[in-house]
Structure formats: C-alpha cells, structure tokens
Amino acid sequence: MVNRLISGFAVLIGLAGVINGAFMSIAPEPWYWLVPGVPDRGPFNQHFLRDIGINYMLIGAAFIGGAVYTKYRFQLWLMPACWLAGHAIFHFWEVFVGICGPEFLVVDFAGVTLPAILAVGLVVISIRRRADD
C-alpha cells in the first residue's frame, strides 16, 4: 500500500515535469509570459528555455521510471532530485545576494522550492525503504 502511494506520488511529480518541460520546449514564449516571476528574471531566451524544458522532461521521465522500476528507484531519482534542489538553492542565493527581493521566494515556491522538497523526500523514502528490504 505504501509503495503504491509513493509510486503514485512519483508519477504525479513526473507528469508535472514532463508536461512543464514539453510546454517550455514547444511554446517557450507563452511559457515565459505565463509563469509568475519568470519575466522578472531576465529577457526571453528561446534556446535557453528549450534547453531547460528538455531537462524537465528528463526529470519527469526519471521519476516515472522510478515509480515503475522500483529496483532502480534510487538511481533514477537521485540526480533529478539534486538538480531540483540545486535549482531551488540557486533561487535562494539570488535573494541572498540581492538579485531579487525576498517576495520571489513566495512567487517561486510552488514551481521551484516545493518540487525540490518533494523530490528529495522521495529519495530519502527510497533510501529508507531500500534499507528495510
């Protein structure tokens, strides 16, 4: 039962990543203008957004893969979780050095910080469940 919940949660995170990445890659300019806080971070760059979109699609695929192939869950989830955590830390750094104001931590929370927390949580759970096996 717990394994099904973990897998279901990972699939949801994975689908969010794949959908977000596909949107970034297929329609980078609408994505740029629709996501709160993004236009405040710098000018539109189609190439950069498509590059990051590919990253998000791979991150999503890894979380879905880990949900399906539980034997490789840790390996599939570790690096995407590290990327998401690094991304969140970078956003905190921008506030710390004065590039943006602290209000951006609230603006970014749902799309940056929360996915990182959830991804790291899934990795920790996978480690604990692996130790129990």
Image (cartoon, rainbow, N blue to C red):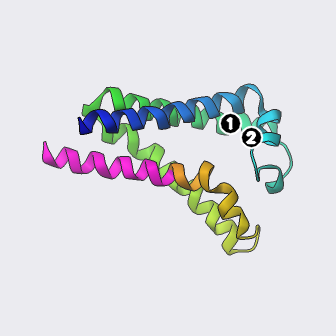
| Circle 1 Cα neighbour tier, 10 Å, few/some/many (<14 / 14–19 / ≥20) | few
Q: Is residue 50 above or below residue 103?
A: above
- Horizontal arrangement in the rendering, residue 65 relative to residue 42 (left or right): left
Looking at the image, which residue sits at the far left? 133
Q: Residue at label 2?
A: 48
Q: In the rendered view of the protein, which quadrant contains the N terminus?
A: top left
**Which residue is farthest front?**
1
Does the magenta-highlighted stretch encompass residue 125?
A: yes
x and y, in percent, of residue 111 in the image? 62, 48
**SS under mark 1:** helix
Q: Is residue 113 above or below residue 92?
A: above
Identify the amino acid type marked 2: Phe
Task: From the viewer's perspective, tell me whether residue 103 is left or right of residue 18.
Answer: right
Magenta segment, which residues? 116-133
SS assignment for the magenta stretch, majority: helix
Determine the residue positioned at 47% across, 34% down: 12
Q: Nearer the viewer, residue 106 or 112?
A: 106
Q: Is residue 33 magenta?
A: no
Quarter of the figure with the C terminus: top left
> Which three-letter amino acid code belongs to the residue tagged 1?
Asp
Residue carrying label 1: 51
